[in-house]
Structures are given as C-alpha cells and as structure tokens.
Amino acid sequence: MAFASFILYAFLLLQFSIGSHGLEMNMIKPEDDQPRHPSPDLSLNVFFKITDLYLGNKIQIYLASKKDSTPTQLLSKEEADSIPFSLSKLPHLLEYFSFSNTSSQAKAMQTTLKQCEVKPIGGEVKTCVTSLKSMMEMTRHFFGMVKPKVLTTKILSSKHTLYQNYTIVEKPKEVNTSKVIACHTMAYPYMVYYCHGHKGHMTRLFKVALGGDNKERINAIAVCHMDTSKWDRDHVSFRILGVRRGSSPVCHVIPVDNFVWFA
Ligand SMILES: *[C@@H]1O[C@H](CO)[C@@H](O)[C@H](O)[C@H]1NC(C)=O
Ligand SMILES: *[C@@H]1O[C@H](CO)[C@@H](O)[C@H](O)[C@H]1NC(C)=O
Ligand SMILES: *[C@@H]1O[C@H](CO)[C@@H](O)[C@H](O)[C@H]1NC(C)=O
C-alpha cells in the first residue's frame, strides 16, 4: 500500500517527540561505546554516529527510495485546506476516504495526525503542512527575510538496494547552517510533510557521497542531532548505536523525497 512505507518515519518521529517523564535512575555505565545492535526490522537501521563520517568508512544503513511507494497525491493549498486535518475529525476523515476504522490506513492516519498534534519540545519548531504552498509559507515564516536553500538526497543509479553497506567515497562536507528545518513525508492519503527544526546548532548537516556494495552511487544529505537529551530514553537509535540518551549525537540520512531547508 502506497503509504505504508512511510509509517516508519511516523514511528521514528513520534519517538523523537514523546520525551521521557520518568526519573533518571543513575545506573548508567560510564563507558559510552557499547556494542551496536542492528534491528531485525531492517527499515529501522537508518542511524549512524557522527564519528562514522569519514572518507573510506563503511556504514550499513537502510535507505528507502521513492520507488518503494506509488506516488502520493499532492494537493493544492485550496484543496488541502478544504479537508479537515485534525485527530478529532478522524472518524469523519475515514468515512470521507472510505477506510474502515480497523484498516492499516486508518492506523497510519491516526499516527500521522497524532504526531502532527504533539507539542514541540524545548526550542523546537514543528508543524505539518499539507501542500507545497503551505511549506513555502512555513519556510518564509521560519527564516524571515533570509532566503533558505534546500537539499535532498539523490540516488544516482537506477538499481537500488534498500539495505546494504555503503562506503563513504568522498570526504564528507559539512554545510554551514544557522537554522535548519527538515520536512519528512508522512503516511496519509495525500502528501503531508512533517517539518521540524531548530535555530542554532542543534543540528549539523553533511553532504555524504556513498558508494553501495552493489556499485550504486548516492549523494546523501545526512543530519546529525547533536543533543538527544530530551528524546525518549528508549528511542530505537540508542540501542542500534549502543549509546545512551544525550551521550552522543545521532545521525541519519534524509530519505529521498524529504527536504532539508537551511540558512
Ligand atoms: C469502528 O466502526 C464501528 C462501526 O462503524 C464502530 O462500532 C466502532 O466503535 C468503531 N471503532 C472505533 C475504534 O472507532
Ligand atoms: C556489511 O558488512 C559486514 C562486514 O563485512 C557484514 O557482516 C554485513 O553482513 C554487511 N551487511 C550487509 C547488509 O550486506
Ligand atoms: C563554515 O564556517 C566556518 C567558520 O565560520 C568557515 O571557516 C568555513 O569556511 C565555512 N565553510 C563553508 C563550506 O562555507
């Protein structure tokens, strides 16, 4: 199903935002580097460490491509604004799109709407946009008078393997930024982007040239979240990378049809 493949991002993002309200028990071992544990769900293996970013290093990651999903309909702002976009309207929306309330589509819509209604965590800017025009308006508001630039990940080969080892074939180039906002596609019957960002240096941005074991080339955009201290303590990336919350930046490649705006 078209939007099932985007559920992953909804899932990852949801965990970014939930945070933990529990008390921190001080049972953490001093050493940072515990063994990595790639997830048996291959599509979760999107994370790497900032110290992995050097010429010649191999990283084993899952990289979703556009081809995994049939195109999702992009609505004009007028069309999108005529459809309610809120969790409280979900029963009405399921009727409107003719989805049963137990279908996977219904679950995906619920996850997306919930995620879009979660309040931002400290210093974060987050919003969901339902059309490209709304995305442009959002960037104008976020960046003010400064005209932002945009980056996307590009797969340069026609054959793409979703999960493999990639060698970093050029020295990674950091992109200087003062503000970054990333817009991720979400599981929904039409195109919805979840955009979240920071002012300041919470996020570092890199251009990384990857060569797959299958010889494919990817010009990837990677983001590193420098401060994970407010993330959910059980965020899947911590186990995969063998790190503790807040102890180490967490990086991932931006999937193909997502945008990173920066200035
Ligand atoms: C799903 O729909 C059925 C019948 O339309 C209804 O009885 C049920 O309460 C609904 N369940 C939820 C979780 O909304
Ligand atoms: C990546 O390389 C490692 C070490 O050579 C190997 O154990 C692993 O199976 C490879 N992963 C994939 C997805 O090919
Ligand atoms: C990034 O900024 C640093 C210091 O502000 C500067 O030395 C460097 O040349 C800049 N890099 C790029 C690619 O603009």
Image (spheres, rainbow, N blue to C red):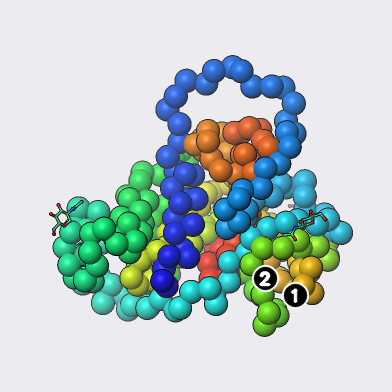
The residue closer to the viewer here, 127 or 37, is 37
Q: Which residue is mark 2?
A: 161
Residue at horizontal 32%, vertical 78%? 76
Identify the secondary structure beneath mark 2.
loop
Q: In the figure, is residue 43 to the left or right of 10?
A: right
> Residue at horizontal 57%, vertical 58%?
43
Q: Quadrant of the C terminus?
A: bottom right
| Number of the label disc, if any, that sits on residue 263 | none
* Residue 49 in sight: yes
Query: Could you tell me if the residues under marks 1 and 2 are in contact, i.e. CB atoms within 8 Å?
Result: yes
Percent coordinates x, y for residue 221 in the rendering:
66, 63
Ligand 2: does it lie within 8 Å of the C-beta at label 1?
no
**Residue type at mark 2?**
Thr
Q: Quadrant of ligand 2?
A: bottom right
Labels 1 and 2: the sequence-earlier one: 2
The image position of residue 94, as x and y in percent, is: 21, 64
Say which quarter of the image contains residue 175: bottom right
Q: Residue at x 23, y 59 (%)?
A: 101
> Relative to residue 218, is residue 44 drawn left or right?
left
Query: Looking at the picture, how far across and down is residue 198, in whole percent?
Result: 52, 49
Q: As drawn, which residue projects farthest toward the bottom?
A: 158
Measure the alpha-carbon separation of dots 1 and 2.
8 Å
Looking at the picture, tell me which residue is in the foreground, 182 or 210. 210
Residue type at mark 1 is Glu
Q: Residue at x 72, y 22 (%)?
A: 30
Asked if 143 appears above or below 13 in the picture, the reply is: below
Q: Residue furthest top?
A: 26
Q: Which residue is mark 1?
A: 216
Residue 120 location in percent, x, y?
A: 41, 44
